[in-house]
Image: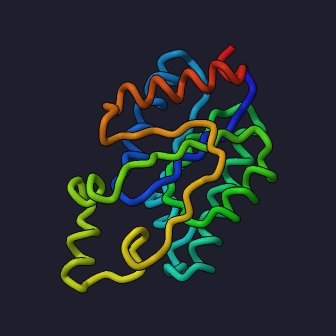
Amino acid sequence: MGKGVTVWFTGLPSAGKTTIAKLVEERLARAGRPVEVLDGDVVRRHLSKELGFSKQDRDENIRRIGYVADLLSRNGVIVLAAAISPYRAVREELRALIGDFVEVWVATDLATCRARDVKGLYARYDRGELRQLTGADDPYEPPLAPELVLRTETQPPEASAEAVLAVLDEGGYLS
């Protein structure tokens, strides 16, 4: 078994984090690598359902995802964590905790995210049904030095997945 690593996909809602993570997962699984996707929405439903969307609750949700990612990656699993994770300090906290950590900023512009609106969040926000939406009325703090920046408004998901795999290969995680 190879060395484990956590790939942390961060970005606005509907940026493409989960789509890219699933494509990377498929490629790694076909190659026989132990891989697990930790999707922010799924983890919230199962491990963090009592949490709201205050800054404190968002930070706690991300810490829980990070804890699970650390457990898996230190046991040889390639973890693909796809969560908005809007606050830089908690992402840096997880980088320090996990060690083998690759931050991928899915830096899709807000207009593209709004146009995709795969979960209908922006539409609900526009109708006044939703508040504390990251990128709308809640802040998103972009990474200062991510290992990879993906621009999904111009790069198709398959090319983004290839870029992630290339970074993992360069880091020695695929050998």
* Tally of numbered tags: 0
Would you say 13 lies left or right of 32 here? Answer: left
Q: Is residue 166 above or below residue 57?
A: above
Quadrant for the N terminus, please.
top right
Q: Residue at x 57, y 73 (%)?
A: 58
Would you say 84 lies left or right of 79 here? Answer: left
Residue 25 percent across, percent down from the top left = 48, 31
Would you say 54 lies left or right of 12 here? Answer: right
Residue 70 percent across, percent down from the top left = 73, 48
The colouring scheme, among rainbow, by chain, secondary structure or one colour, is: rainbow
Quarter of the view holding residue 93: bottom right
Q: Residue at x 43, y 70 (%)?
A: 134
Residue 108 appears in the picture as rendered: yes
Q: Residue at x 25, y 60 (%)?
A: 114
Residue 118 appears in the picture as rendered: no
Q: Is residue 169 above or below residue 122?
A: above
Q: Nearer the viewer, residue 79 or 145?
A: 145
Quarter of the view holding residue 22: top left
Residue 63 percent across, percent down from the top left = 68, 64
Q: Residue at x 46, y 66 (%)?
A: 45
